[in-house]
Amino acid sequence: MIEIKGGTIEEKIIKQLQKTYPISIKDLEKKIHISRIRIIRVLQRFQVKGIVQLESLPDKTFVRLLRFDFKFVTKKRQRKFIKHSHTKKQYQAPDDDSIMYS
């Protein structure tokens, strides 16, 4: 089982590879809106780990997913919003010491 952090470029690439096959690097760049150089770096790291295989053709490079046992790990978040109670300020009438109230 390969653990991948949620909200990272790696997560976006793997989820897109799981959705669409075959996909080229150019199509991947358009779909996840990340530069080609960053995608190639991540894919080369994945290729070293044995997760993907890059298939080069004369005009395109296709990406093939070799493993499918991924676990996406995210931060634990509190599902329900905590309502904070605020104490209401008591209204105080101003003390008038003017001539009118003597």
Image (spheres, grey):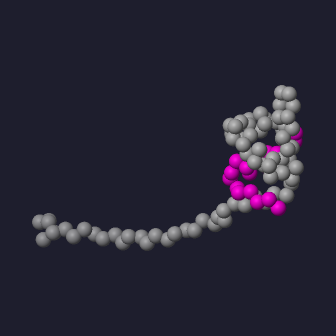
Q: Position of residue 64 (x, y in %)?
A: 86, 43
Q: In which quarter of the image is the C terminus?
A: bottom left
Q: How many labels does the image show?
A: 0
Residue 42's image quarter? top right
Res 18 visible? no
Res 52 visible? yes
Residue 17 part of the magenta segment: yes
User: Which region shows up in magenta?
Assistant: 1-22
Residue 25's image quarter? top right
Residue 5 part of the magenta segment: yes
Q: In which quarter of the image is the N terminus?
A: bottom right
Position of residue 4 in the picture relative to residue 55 (left or right): left
Instruction: Identify which residue is drawn at 21% across, 70% down.
Output: 95
Position of residue 37 in the picture relative to residue 65 (left or right): left
From what the image shows, is residue 86 above or below residue 16?
below
Instruction: Identify which residue is drawn at 86% across, 54% down.
Output: 68
From what the image shows, is residue 23 above or below residue 87?
above
Instruction: Identify which residue is drawn at 25% across, 68% down.
Output: 94
Q: Where is residue 23 in the image (x, y as percent from the top left)?
A: 84, 38
